[in-house]
């Protein structure tokens, strides 16, 4: 059974990897808003579990992806950021799953 935080991580990974394709600008805006909300929730969940390092990372990612004051990095840099964040999310899901299996 997948928990809420892992489901959010999988959805965000999928959306971020879709950003590597040539999509309409409105899709990227939707991804930025969805990522901001998703990372904010993940930060909240990390805070509830007293995981301060994860809290810092998720809040930083929420600020990076927020759509209101856009950070202009260029398409290539954003693609690199999307891939790195996606890899981190996948690693996090695998790590969480292994911890759950041990219990």
Image: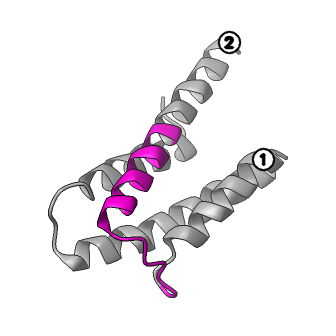
**Residue linked to disc 1:** 53
Q: Nearer the viewer, residue 28 or 37?
A: 28
Marks 1/2 in contact by CB < 8 Å: the verdict is no
Residue 73 place in picture, x, y as percent: 42, 71
- Position of 10 with respect to 28 (left or right) is right
**Residue linked to disc 2:** 102
Counting every numbered tag in the picture gives 2
* Residue at 39% in and 46% down: 83
* Residue at 30% in and 66% down: 75
Residue numbers of the magenta segment: 68-88
What colouring style does the render use?
one colour
Q: Which mark is residue 33?
A: none
* Mark toward the start of the polypeptide (1 vs 2): 1
| Residue 101 sits in quarter | top right
SS at circle 1:
helix
Q: CA distance from mark 1 to mark 2?
A: 22 Å
Q: Nearer the viewer, residue 75 or 46?
A: 75
* Residue at 58% in and 67% down: 62
Q: Nearer the viewer, residue 16 or 76?
A: 76
In this picture, is 84 found above or below 22? above
Residue 10 place in picture, x, y as percent: 41, 43
Q: Residues within 10 Å of mark 2 (few under 14, many from 20)?
A: few
- Position of 60 with respect to 25 (left or right) is right
SS at circle 2:
helix
| Residue 74 sits in quarter | bottom left
Q: Quadrant of the C terminus?
A: top right
* Magenta segment main secondary structure: helix
Q: Residues within 10 Å of mark 1 (few under 14, many from 20)?
A: few
Q: Nearer the viewer, mark 1 or mark 2?
A: 1
Residue 33 place in picture, x, y as percent: 43, 74
In this picture, is 11 found above or below 64? above
* Residue at 38% in and 62% down: 78
């Amino acid at each position: 059974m997948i928990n809420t935080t892992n489901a959010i991580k999988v959805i965000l990974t999928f959306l971020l990897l879709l950003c590597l394709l040539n999509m309409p600008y409105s899709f990227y805006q939707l991804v930025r808003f969805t990522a901001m909300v998703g990372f904010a929730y993940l930060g909240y969940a990390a805070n509830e579990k007293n995981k301060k390092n994860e809290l810092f990372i998720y809040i930083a990612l929420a600020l990076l992806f927020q759509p209101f004051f856009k950070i202009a990095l260029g398409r290539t840099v954003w693609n690199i950021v999307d891939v790195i964040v996606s890899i981190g999310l996948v690693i996090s899901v695998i790590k969480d799953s292994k911890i759950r299996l041990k219990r």
